[in-house]
Amino acid sequence: MRTSGTIILGGLAAFGATAAAAAPPALVPLPASIIAQPGRGFDVPTSPRLRVAPHDDAARAAATALRDRLASTTRLRPSVVESAEPSAGDIAFASDPAAPGGTEGYSLTVADTGVTIRASAAAGLYYGGVTLWQLLTQQPGGTTHLADVTIADQPRFAWRGLMLDSARHMQPVAYVERFLDWMAVHKLNRFHWHLTDDQGWRIEIKRYPRLTSVGAWRTAVAPDTIAPDGTPVTRYGGFYTQDQIRAVVAYAAARHITIVPEIDLPGHSTALIAAYPRLGVRGFAPEPVASDWGLLPEVLNTDEATIATVENILTEVMALFPGRFVHLGGDEVDPTQWQTSAETQARMTALGLKDAPALERWFIARLGRFLEAHGRRLIGWDEIQEGATGAGLDSQAAIMSWHDGDGAAKAIASGHDVVIAQAPLYYLDNRQKNTADEPPGWSDIVTARMLYEHDPVPAGLSPEARRHVLGLQGQMWTERARREDWVTQMVWPRAAAIAEVGWSPPARDWDGFQSRMAVQRARYRLIGLDAGTEVAAPPAPGPRRASIDLDFCTPGATAFILEAPPRAGGGTALVRVSPQHPCWLYRAADLDAARRLDVAAVKLAFNMRLGNAAPIARLAKPRTAAGEIDVHLDRVDGPLLASLPLGGWPADADRHALSAALPGGGGRHDLYFVLTGADIDSRAKVRPPMIAVESVALQ
C-alpha cells in the first residue's frame, strides 16, 4: 500500500493526508488519480525552462502551447528549450511510447526539483500542459509554488464535444477560434460545426457558388433587423470561405480538437433548395432562404441527380475537414412532399421501401456508403435509424442521440456507436436560470448541476454494450442567440460540467465541483471568457411582474423566452411566449388594495413554423375585431376580472399600454391573462404579429 499521500479517484476522497495540501487542486475536469507526495514542493522560477528532447515534435508542440498560455495569463515568462540533459528546475515534456493512458492520457509529476509531463502521444502531452497551467493559476496573479504530487490521468470517454450552430446565426472566425480555446482548457475534443440549415448555408462550395451567393442570405426579421451594434439590417447572412475553414481546422488541430462538420440532409434544406431548386421535390424555389424557425416542409429529392450533387458537395467538405466523422443531420424530416410526389412514390416502390422513414434511411445510408468509400464515417441524429429493417443503414454509422435514452439504447442494440446529446438536458439553448440578465432561449431550465449529475450511459447496458457509447455532447442552437456574448453565457459554465462528466471517472461530488469551479471562473477572466451565472435573483417585491416573472398557463407547452423590440431607452427586453397557448399566469395577486390593472403589451414577429401536427395557434374567441387580453380569476376559463381591448394599438408602434379599472377587494387570486383573436396558421406566407405581455402591474 502506498502511504505517501491520498489517492483521489474522481473526487471521492479528501485531498490532504499530508500537511502540504488541505484540499484537492482546483482542476477542471478532475484527473483520474491525484496522489500527494511528501516533500517541500517546487518553486517555479519566473522564467522557467520548458525542456523537450531533441526531435520530439509532440513535446515541443505541447511545451509551446503551455508557454504561450502562461505568457498571456500569468507573470511567468517561460521559454522552450531543446535539450537531452535535465537540469534542476526544468519543466520537462517527454514522449514515451510505453506510457499508459492511451493517446489522450498523461502523467504529471511535481517533485522538489521540477515537473515532468509524460505521455505516449501528442494529445496527452498537450492535456498534461493544460493541467499544469491550471495548477499554476489556482490563485490570483498565479501560483509559483507547487506541492509535490503525482497525477495519472486519462479520459472516460473518447468523444467530449460541443456543437455550435453557425447556420441560424453566424459567428465571426475570431469568435469560433476563441470558442475552441475555451474548449481546449476543458479538454473537450470534438467541435461539431452546424454549417447548414433552412436559414442559411455557411460553407463555401466551389462547384456550386449559388450555395453562398443565394443560400447564405435571408431577409432579416426582427430582432435580426437591428444588429448588436444598433445598425439596421435588411439582409442577414454570410459564409465561411474555404481558406477560413482550413485556418479554423488547423487552429483546432493544434488544440487537439477534431471538427465534425454537419451538412443537414434531407430535411432542414430550404437554403440548399433555394439556391438549386432542382434538388427539391417540387423542382422550383419554394421561397427565399427561410427567415422562420421551426419545422419547415422542404425536403430533398432522392433521385440520382440529387444524390450526385450531394456527393460532389461532400467531396469538397471532406477535402476541408480531415476528421473521420461527417455529420449528415437526418433529423425532423417532414414527409409531406415525398408522400404527395408521384415521382418519389414511384422511386420508393422501385426500391421496395414502404414509408417515408424508410426512404430517408435509404437516402442517408446511400450517402454513408459514399463516405465510407472515402475513408470517412457517417454520423447523424436519431432519425437516421428509423424506417423499415433492411433499408441499408450500415452498422458503422454512428447515432447522435438527441431523443430520450431509448433512442441511444435502440441504436446500441442495432450495433451502432452513439454520442449522447439528448434534449432538453444537453441543449444549451435552454436557459440556466429565469432572470432578465439571462439570454433568450427555450423556457426550460437546465442547470450545470443537472448536467453534472447525469450519467450519459443508458441504464441496464452490459459491459459490451457500454463500449458503444462514444461519449457526450452539448448543443448550442442559435435561433434566439444572435449575439456572441449570449452564446458564451449559454454554453459556459455548463460546458465545464459536460467536460468533467466526459473526462473524469463516473463518481460525482457536486460540492467539490462547485469549489473547483470558483477557481475556474477566475481563470475564465484570464482567458476572456465571460461565462453566465446560475444565481437567480428573486423577483423584485411589489405588485409589478415582468413577463419572465409570470408563468405559462399550460404546463409542458412549447414555450420560449424571446427578445422583444428594444425599448426607447435602450436595453434588451425579454418576454415569455407560448405560441400555441398565448396565456400568462400571475400567481397569488393581491387584489384587496388594487384599483387599476396596467398591462404593457408588445408585438413580436411570428417567424416560427409550428409543424404539421399542430400548425395553428388557436386563440380564444375575441369579442372585438382586434381581440383583447382577458383577465380571468383562478382558471383560464374562470370569472372575468377585466378585458383589455387591443383595438387602439397604433399601427406603427411595437408597444401598447393597456389599463382597466378594478372593483377592489377580493383577496388573493391567480390571474390568467388570455390573448383572444383570430387563429394564426404558422404555414401562411403572411402572418400577423404575436402579441405578448411584457409586464403587469396592480395599482
Image (cartoon, rainbow, N blue to C red):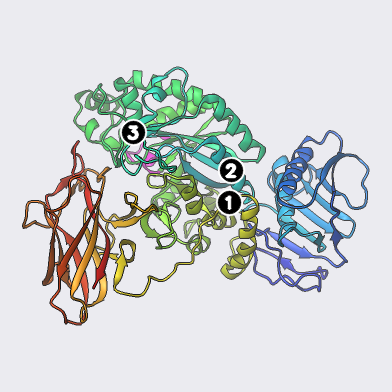
The answer for how far apart the CA atoms under marks 1 and 2 are is 9 Å
Residue 170 visible to the viewer: yes
| Label 3 vs 2, first from the N-terminus | 2
The spot of residue 88 in percent (x, y) is 92, 52
- The residue shown at (84%, 56%) is 44
Q: Are marks 1 and 3 in contact (CB under 8 Å)?
A: no
Residue 350 to residue 232: above or below: above
Give the mark, 1 or 3, whose residue is nearer the N terminus: 3
The Cα atoms of the two marked residues, 3 and 2, are separated by 28 Å
Q: Is residue 329 left or right of residue 591?
A: right
The reply, left or right, for residue 328 in relation to residue 35 is left
Name which residue type carries label 1.
Leu
User: What are the residue bounds of the magenta stretch?
Assistant: 382-393
Residue type for callout 3:
Thr
Decide: marks 1, 2 in contact (CB < 8 A)?
A: yes
The answer to which quarter of the image holds residue 5 is bottom right
Per the image, the residue denoted by label 2 is: 178
Label 1, label 3: how many angstroms apart (C-alpha)? 31 Å
Mark in the foreground, 3 or 2: 3
Q: If you read the primary sequence from the N terminus, does the residue marked by circle 1 or circle 2 appear first?
A: 2
Q: Residue at x 51, y 36 (%)?
A: 172
Where residue 27 sits, quadrant-wise, is: bottom right
The residue labelled by disc 3 is 234
Q: Which residue is mark 1?
A: 529
Camera-side residue: 347 or 34? Answer: 34
